[in-house]
Amino acid sequence: MLSTIEWKNDNVVMIDQTLLPTQEIFVTCSDYKQVADAIFSMKIRGAPAIGVAAAMGVAIGAVKSTAGNTAALLAELDDICDVIGATRPTAVNLFWAIKQMKNLAYDNASLSVSQLKNVLKNRAIEICAQDISINKAMGKNGAQFIKDGDCILTHCNAGALATAGYGTALGVIRAAHEQGKHIEVMADETRPFLQGARLTAWELKYDGIPVTLITDNMAGYFMKKGKIDLVVVGADRIAANGDAANKIGTYSVAVLAKEHNIPFYVAAPIATLDLSLSSGEQIPIEERSTDEVTHIAGKAIAPEGIKVANPAFDVTPASYITAIITEKGVAQGNYKENLKLLAT
Ligand code: MRU
């Protein structure tokens, strides 16, 4: 299985996703600032992978610290968490992981500096390993919705690359494939960052799962033709009422799916739930650089100086979502009650 991110000799090693699919280059981050930059510049991306990177970023910040006592290390960790927390605003997994690491550090304030460094490093490695088991459990829970012969539409990349391994939406697809179901995937290219074309198509091809790449504006055409049996996507943050933020364009796919009576599933770990938000309206949406819209692979495709908008995510209202698949089970119907039950 492809390794997205790894703790290696007290460094954080990750595949540079901005260079895929043409170059498979692994970058080594030797301090927390490099990890923060990797998250910001999307060398690593996808909500669960961002969470793992954040945990490892805090751990590497601790391990490389020269603090002479635990109180000084804790003070340093506060600053490190602030830097990592300022990288990307939408995926709640980032804040979940930072909170996990910070709480762990403060709960162990009585340890020596070297003991605390070890505790944090081990927890980050554990968060990474757990993410893979969580995805496999999610895959099992979701595979029931995929029948032999189905064609599944997905948007963005919610695969091994977006997690520590296996994937969320692609984990569900992978699990169905492993069960011997003959399935086919249609991957939206996912403008402007092209996660579908560059990452999902690459990842599924790598694993031998049949995939057809389409541009985002082709989804309706294929739905109308009866080609798509279901949609499965990931999420970056799910509010208490089931509204789900995911890559820009997901909402349009959900509206199209509803119009064509096609089931629309969201697969995400419990760490992606943000039950402190009553609705998706409160989810912060990241606005990214205008270059992502005006340029493709460094080449300008729009007039210089043109006004551009580039929201990186949108929110799909719960009423468009057939079910939310998690590692702990599937929520359907009354999301407010059922998500709370799954989260406890
Ligand atoms: O901007 P990105 O590439 O980090 O956005 C990723 C997505 O929107 C994914 O669909 C989401 O994080 C789920 S990943 C398992």
Image (cartoon, rainbow, N blue to C red):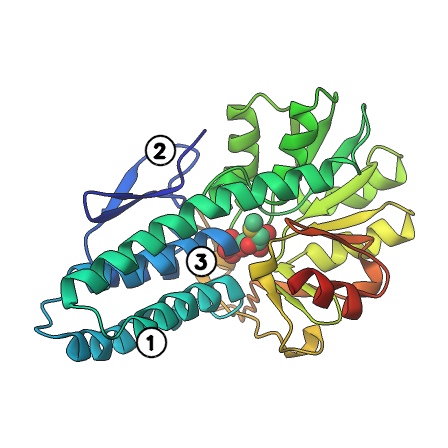
The answer to whether residue 44 shows anywhere in this view is no
Whole-angstrom CA distance, mark 3 to mark 2, is 24 Å
Q: Which residue is mark 3?
A: 51
Whole-angstrom CA distance, mark 3 to mark 1, is 14 Å
The reply, left or right, for residue 275 in relation to residue 23 is right
- Observer-side mark, 3 or 2, equals 3
Instruction: Identify the residue shown where x is 42% and y is 52%.
Output: 127
In terms of depth relative to the viewer, which is nearer, 24 or 311?
Answer: 24
Horizontal and vertical percent for residue 168?
60, 45
Q: Secondary structure at mark 2?
A: loop
In terms of depth relative to the viewer, which is nearer, 185 or 256?
Answer: 185
Horizontal and vertical percent for residue 285?
57, 71
Up/down of 248 relative to 70, above or below = above
The reply, left or right, for residue 151 in relation to residue 96 is right
Q: Which residue is mark 1?
A: 82
The answer to whether residue 263 shows anywhere in this view is yes
Q: Secondary structure at mark 1?
A: helix
Res 207 quadrant in image: top right
Dot placed on the residue nearer the N-terminal end, 1 or 2: 2
Quarter occupied by the N terminus = top left
Horizontal and vertical percent for residue 324?
74, 54
Whole-angstrom CA distance, mark 1 to mark 2, is 32 Å
Up/down of 239 relative to 64, above or below = below
